[in-house]
Image (cartoon, rainbow, N blue to C red):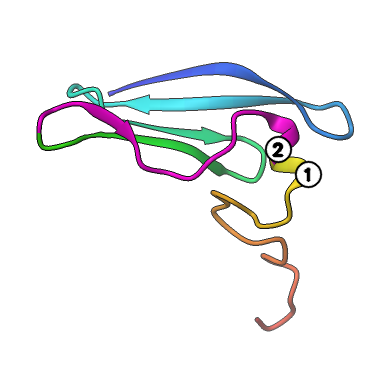
Amino acid sequence: MSISQKPYGVDLIGRPMTLYTMTNKQGASVSVLDFGAHIVSIRVPDRDGNLADVALGFDSMEDYQTQDKFVGAIVGRYANRIAGG
């Protein structure tokens, strides 16, 4: 398995964000953004071996910050903020 990283823009307060991609020997991969651990893409082979992205994700950092549906988020906006939850 290999892990690569690349810049993915900046957040609303100017912090640089990074996209991490983990790829296995068969070419399947998962890309995760360090902005709330959003899953940007999951590429897996179909029955013919062709890789396809099966995750709903955005193409830019701006999209993740302006939408309100938490697409690809690992946890919601209230994680660890509700006492006794």
x then y, percent, for residue 42: 38, 37
Most extreme residue toward the bottom, as rendered?
A: 84
The C terminus lies in which quarter of the figure? bottom right
- Which quarter of the picture shows residue 13? top right
Compared across the picture, whether 84 is left or right of 14 comes to left
Element at label 1 = helix
- Residue visible at 54% across and 49% down in the picture: 72
- Residue visible at 74% across and 79% down in the picture: 83
Residue type, label 1? Thr
The residue that label 1 is drawn on is 66
Element at label 2 = helix
Q: Are marks 1 and 2 in contact (CB under 8 Å)?
A: yes
Position above or below: 35 against 68:
above
Distance between the alpha carbons at the discs numbered 1 and 2: 5 Å
Viewer-side residue, 52 vs 1: 52
The numbered dot on residue 63 is: 2
Residue type, label 2? Asp
Q: Residues within 10 Å of mark 1 (few under 14, many from 20)?
A: few
Q: Is residue 51 magenta?
A: yes
- Which quarter of the picture shows residue 77? bottom right
Position above or below: 84 against 62:
below
x then y, percent, for residue 10: 77, 25
Magenta: main secondary structure equals: loop
Q: Is residue 21 magenta?
A: no
Compared across the picture, whether 30 is left or right of 34 comes to left
The N terminus lies in which quarter of the figure? top left
x then y, percent, for residue 12: 86, 35
Residue range in magenta is 48-63
